[in-house]
Image (spheres, grey):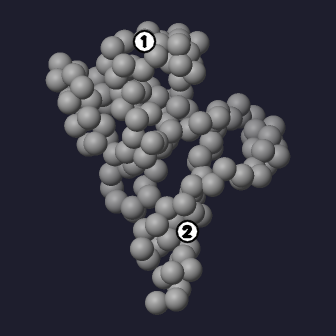
Amino acid sequence: MIDAGSPRAQRLRDAGHKLTHARLTVLRVLEESGGHITSAEVLERVSRLDATIGRASVFRALDLFTSLSLIRPTYIDTSQTPTYVLMPDGHHHHIICTQCGQVIEFEQCGLNELAEELARKLGFQLTGHLVEFYGVCAACRRK
């Protein structure tokens, strides 16, 4: 099980939520996945860890984690099923090849000033962001 003292567990606690076994198990699955996982994969892996955790509990946990900006759904494969990504430090970034589907994660986004300006102008308290750039990778362009 994930450590109840982990930063993500602490964010749950700080937001006034209980650290239930189901929530901690879903967090463990998300963290062990490397940060990219579909809801079907989450369900399967949670079931392998503890078959008593129901589908509704898993989806409620995913919804809660999304509302707290611990994860974000993204549509990397342009399918109807989202892939959930962990949001370390409140942000996550991809460059995605539209031909072969290669996904490259990058850290430096340079959006801090823009985020602060948007928050100020629009009266938002931003909790995170997900950036995806789409294009054609070098290997696909050479084909």
Residue type indicated by callout 2: Tyr
- Name the residue furthest bottom: 143
Q: Secondary structure at mark 1?
A: loop
The image quadrant of residue 64 is: top left
Q: Specify which label sits upstream in the sequence, 2 or 1.
A: 1
Give the label on residue 3, or none: none
Q: CA distance from mark 2 to mark 1?
A: 37 Å
Residue type indicated by callout 1: Leu
The residue under the point 43% across, 68% down is 101
The residue under the point 48% across, 82% down is 140
Is 123 on the left-hand or right-hand side of 98? right
Tell me the crowding category of disc 2: few under 14, some 14 to 19, or many 20 or more residues within 10 angstroms, Cα based. some
User: Circle 1 is placed at which residue position?
Assistant: 19
Using the image as rendered, state which of residue 70 and residue 114 is in the foreground. Answer: 70
Q: Position of residue 9 (x, y in %)?
A: 50, 18
The residue under the point 44% across, 77% down is 99
Using the image as rendered, state which of residue 60 and residue 34 is in the foreground. Answer: 34
Give the label on residue 134, or none: 2
Tell me the crowding category of disc 1: few under 14, some 14 to 19, or many 20 or more residues within 10 angstroms, Cα based. some
Is 99 on the left-hand or right-hand side of 56? right
The image quadrant of residue 59 is: top left
Q: Position of residue 50 (x, y in %)?
A: 21, 22
Q: Is residue 102 shown above or below 28?
A: below
